[in-house]
Image (tube, rainbow, N blue to C red):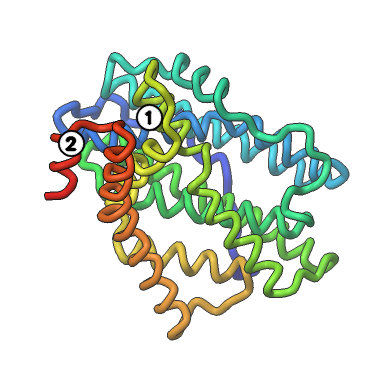
Amino acid sequence: MDKNTVAVMGTWILEDIPWDEFDLEKVAPDILRVVKAASLVEFNADDYRRYLQNVFKDDAKVCSAIGQWSIEEVQHGRALGMWAEMADPDFDFERSFRTFTENFRVQLDATASVRGSRSGEMIARCMVETGTNSFYSALGDATEEPVLKAICRRIAADEFAHYCLFHASMSRYLQRENLTFPERLKVAFERVAETEDDELATAYWAANAYGEHFDRRRNSVAYARDSLQYYRPQHVARGVEMIFKAIGLNPAGPLGWAASRAVRTFIWYRIRLMPRLAVVRARLFGHVSRLEFLQQRT
């Protein structure tokens, strides 16, 4: 990250959102499902705050910044939840959040980073903020609903500021811990791979299929199908740039281009092929109807 970059957090409040411009006719069902899930994950940031402040308990500067970060993440969840309840009066944010937290738990008793080092923890946090910045940028560009567009653009800006914050702390800790490039790459890859974990699948289920049996794979595929379709080349390229800067690579040139191409290919695979494979698998075990099976094959 450029040393002249300044991370400014806490620049908006819920009252700044133009709620009176809400247009129900411009709410897309698939975007609504994704927003419901995202609201639960964002609102759960206080658990991550506790974990991170345990890891950095003797670094007052980082702990203070993490406290402010969690306040803003919770506000993201509240704003998205309020919008989702406007878009779907049957959606109960509080009930869905209870269901989510009853079925997904952050490791709160850790006293050291699960990444093996503090600089590794900050690299992982950079990966998270890269993902959320690109996600809300893509969602904000895709939606035609004016209130959601305003929310997403504010959240995307916050997530970039959070990335800058964690990147600065990462750089400071790297001077002490001196992680090698392979070690940095390993942490980054593992954290990116964790987007396939239980958290997003559980949130998607809790927000959209309350009362039904939880199927991790099916909900993970459904979340990816609904969310990844809105990524455009510029969103992917921006995400790759942020990842490269966090692991110490220059995003310009052939390597950055190849990485962007690989990510776009992966997104295509997740959107087009994975849902079909999931339905074939479910069909083999009797989890879907013949009609749904045939629909996915066409």
Which residue type does callout 1 highlight?
Lys
Neighbor class of circle 1 (other Cα within 10 Å; few <14, some 14-19, many 20+) is many
Q: Is residue 242 left or right of residue 68?
A: left
Quadrant in which the N terminus is drawn: bottom right
Q: Residue at x 29, y 14 (%)?
A: 90
Whole-angstrom CA distance, mark 1 to mark 2, is: 24 Å
Contact (Cβ within 8 Å) of mark 1 with mark 2: no
Residue 15 visible in rendering: no
Give the side of residue 209 with respect to residue 239, left or right: left
**Residue under label 1:** 36
**SS under mark 2:** helix
Q: Nearer the viewer, mark 1 or mark 2?
A: 2
Residue at point 37%, 20% (across, down): 212
On screen, residue 177 above or below 126: below
Residue 49 appears in which quarter of the rendering? top right
The answer to whether residue 21 is left or right of residue 98 is: left
Q: Is residue 136 visible?
A: yes
Residue placed farthest to the right in the image?
A: 58
Name the spot of residue 54 as percent of width and height, x first: 80, 38
Instruction: Decide which of 188, 128 is in the foreground and name it.
Output: 188
Residue type highlighted by circle 2: Glu
Q: Position of residue 252 (x, y in %)?
A: 47, 81
Residue located 55% across and 36% down the image: 73
Q: Is residue 233 above or below residue 191?
A: below
SS of the residue at dot 1?
Answer: helix
Sequence-earlier tag: 1 or 2: 1
What residue does disc 2 label?
292
Q: Is residue 168 above or below residue 223?
A: below
Lateral position of residue 87 relative to residue 173, left or right: left
Residue located 43% across and 35% down the image: 38
Place of residue 206 in the rendered image (x, y in percent of width and height, measured from the top left):
43, 24
Front residue of 124/288: it is 288
